[in-house]
Structure formats: structure tokens, C-alpha cells
Image (cartoon, rainbow, N blue to C red):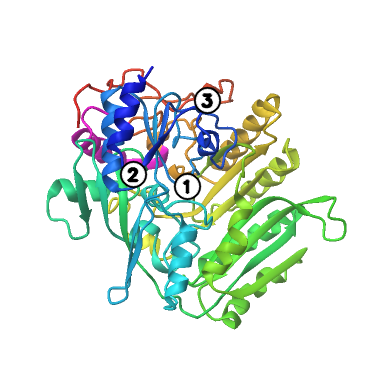
Amino acid sequence: MLSSTAINELSAELSGYVLQPGDPDYEKALQIDNGRIQFRPALIIFPAVVNDVRIGMRFAIRHHLPLSIKGGGHSAAGYCMNEGGVVIAMKNLNKISFDPKKETLTAQMGVIWYDLYKYMQNTGTGLIPIGGGCPTVAPPGFMQGGGYSFVSRSYGMSIDNLLSLKIITPDGELRHIGLHSSDKEDIDLFWACRGGGGGNFGVVVEMEMKMRKPYSDTMLVGQIRYPLEATEEVLGYYNDWIEKVPNTMACYGYMGNQKDLVDPAKLVKVLGLTPVFNGECAEGMDLLQGLLKLKPINADLFNMTLPNWEFYNGNTTKVDGRASYIRSTVLPKGGMNNKVAKVIIDAIDDAPSSDSFAVWTSTGGVMEDIAPDATAYFHRHSRFVPEVKSIWPLNRPQDTLKNVQWAHDFFEKMAEAGNATGAYVNYIDPLQHDWAKMYYGENYKRLLEIKKRVDPHNYFNFQQGIGSDFNPPKGPVTDLSPLNRTQYHQHQHKAAAELV
């Protein structure tokens, strides 16, 4: 138990403020996108200035407490929170600036993508950040995991547009690292921060990003939905088609339910495609003709700016406080084959909750031009990154096991059918067997070496943090305990008492 004296001393040192259980805003501050996550930290620190982050980090280490960093609150496993420890909630560190000559944006890491999209819209330049499809996600976790954008086939991943960042490392130093770095340790750390996952090497407090000019003022975007039973035919075409379209065309996927167009009280099982064309509308329409001839139920296509599309469409994949379990896989070229189509049909037909769905990200394009070991993000030669969100009512904990088992089994079968090459750390899954290899591939060895240098006492540790030997078993899910914790201390170094 923390003494009131220690907490009062911390509060006096901070420019920001602290929330504890019982404080009026504490319960609200606990909320993240996945309502199943119900961790209760001892303290939530809201920094007002960057030095507050250092103070909060030092406090957690001194008192041997778990330490988590909360940005947008979209950690699939709730690793942005913890039980009984310290959470640093970044949201009040939200300064943004734009350099029109360099076409770069610099932002403190309490922002969410919505803030950056709106900020750039207001510059009137037409430039956009290479950010997330959900506007309430925050950049630091998203970018440290790699970061896919609807226009990543044109401009690379989010990390490929990251020029520099400022990070407070466990020794308390504020380091400015980036493409400009010449010191080997800084070069290594910047490499690790581009795909090595958030929460492993320190607290990123600022990022400098390259802004990009779309190829036209507006883009062709939208949703095409087919009856689920057409999945084999549609994917049979799509699997070849996506290899022939230019890098300017991305086409994501959706598997789940939509409201019946005539009777909204009914649900219809569908396979959906989400095209986003970085170019003139007419050219994009020409590219979509083959897909439109496959007898969709509906095709809702729009001509709008990418930020407006993010605002219109981006909230459709939120868990929004319901209970959820999230899992991913990574499929290679040709991965959307007939075997995968059959897996999709069977799984969506058998879903225990009508709220559950799966999506996939369309990869390839210029992302493949960067070698798998040039950044910590390993899966450069993937073609599709599917994600399943099993969602059920928060007031029905008795439904947890069957919904988790459904999603886990669905993606185990999809991985086998599609010849999966890994999984995506931004959809981090506490039940993922062999997660270090699945997320990081051959880059894990170098990540581990950097981790030992930067954080030798393992102050930044969590269940699936770099260096953890946690590894859930392969096979059917019987043990849900990994879903209900953030820490895993077996064989891990205990946090040392020294201050940073």
C-alpha cells in the first residue's frame, strides 16, 4: 500500500495531477475501448509537461509498482492499464506544430489521430498524416507497432513516415532519436521503436512525421457488401485482382453482419470489401468494375478526402465499451484462397454473438520495398493482415469462454488455410502461442539485445513485453487467465530499487 505521504509528495512535484480510487474522475479514467478490461491501478498520473512523465516513471520504479502508459486506450489486451500500479495517462500532452517548408508535423504523444487529421485539414495544404483508420487511436502505440494506413500501399507504413521521436528511457534521459541519429545506441533504439511494439523501451513523448500529398483532392472510398455465401467467388476474384491493381488502390475486407436493407431489425451475414483509391474517382471506378459485377448486395461509394472518410467510417470497428477478445494473423500473397473462404463462411455462420466480426488490412505496395530487417517491423512481404473482434455484452461474463474459443479457433483455422506467416503486435493477443516469433520474426533477437541495453532492470515489463518468457500453449483454449492480467513475473527480473 502506498502511504498518503508518498502520494502527497508526488502530487506536489507534478505540474499535472494524480487520480486515486475514490476520486471523482477515477472511474472514467479507467475506461478503454475494450470494456472487458477492468484493471484498477493505484494511481493514474496526468502529466501537464514532459518532465511529469519522468517523475511518474521514477515514482513507479521507487515503489516497485507496475507501470503502464495510456494513450488512446485501444490496447487489445489492456496492456495500457494494470492492477495496483501506476498508469501515466498522456492525454494532456497534446501540443501540435507544422513546418510547411519541410512538410512535417510534430506532436506530443497525448494526441489521437483525430487531432492530427483535423489539425492538418485546418492548414489548408491538403497534406495528410499516414495514420490509423480509427480516429480515436493514439499515434505512439500504433506507430511503435508498425501502423497501417489506408494509403500505406502508396506511402509506406506509419513508421516509414516517422522522422524522429523523443523518448524518456528507463534511466530518466530524454533522448531525441531519429533518421538524424549518428550514435549507435540511438540508431538501434530508433530501429526498435519502429515496429518493436509500445511499452518496451521507454515512454515516447513526441513524434515528428512526414506529411503526404494525396494524388487528388478527394479519393474514391466506400463499402461493397456481398452475401456471405458468395465468399468463395468474391475472394477467388479478389485474390488475383489485388496483385494487378496499382499501389494507389487499397481494398480492405470485412466479415460479419449488417442490417437488412429492407428490414433493419434483421441482420444479414456478409463479406465486405472497403476500397480506398488514392487518385481520381473515375480511375478508381474503372478498377472496381470486376468487383461490382460480382452481384453485391449494396455498394456505397463516396468521393471525399481521406480524413473525412476516417471520420465517417473509422468508428465502425470500435468495441466501444463492450466485452471483447481480439486476435490477428498475417497472410502472404495468395492468402485469400478457397480454403480461407470456407473457413470464413463456417466461422461467421457459427459466431455465438452477432456483434462479432473480422476485418483485414490490405498490404503490399511500397511497404514491400523496405527490407524486413530495415526496421523492427518484420512482416513486409505480407498481403493481408486479418483481425477478429469477438464481442459480447459486458453484463454476460458467462459468455466469455465460448466467444473467446470461437475467435481463437476461427483464426487458428484461417492461419492454417492461408499459410500464415505471423501475427500483428498492434492486435496483441495474450493467447497467442509463440508470440515473440509471430510478432517479430527474425527481428526478435536484435530487439532483445536492445532491450537489455536500454532497460537492463526490465522496468518496462508486461506479459508480452520484449524479454518475457510467457508463452501460452498451442491448441484449444481452456485457460483464460492470461486475458485477466498485464504482468507476468515468472523468471523475470524484479524491478530494482534504484532511482532512474
How far from the left and from the top, in percent, is residue 432?
48, 32
- Asked if the stretch drawn in magenta spans residue 443, the answer is yes
Relative vertical location of residue 174 with respect to residue 311 in this rendering, above or below: above
33 or 328: nearer the viewer: 33
Camera-side residue of 43 and 106: 43
Residue 396 percent location from the top left of the image: 71, 28
What distance separates the C-alpha of mark 1 from that of mark 3?
A: 20 Å
Residue at point 16% right, 56% down? 181
Q: Which of pointers 1 and 3 lies earlier in the amino acid sequence? A: 1
The residue sitting at 60% across, 48% down in the picture is 318
Please tell me the numbered disc located at residue 336: none
Q: Residues within 10 Å of mark 3 (few under 14, many from 20)?
A: some
| SS at badge 3 | helix
Q: Is residue 136 magenta?
A: no
Dot 1: element: loop
Q: Badge 2 is on which residue?
A: 196
What's the residue type where badge 1 is placed?
Gly
Range covered by the magenta-colored residues? 438-460
Quarter of the figure with the C terminus: top left
Q: Which mark is residue 484?
A: 3
> Mark 1 packing: few (<14 Cα in 10 Å), some, or many (20+)?
many
| Pair 1/3: label in front | 1
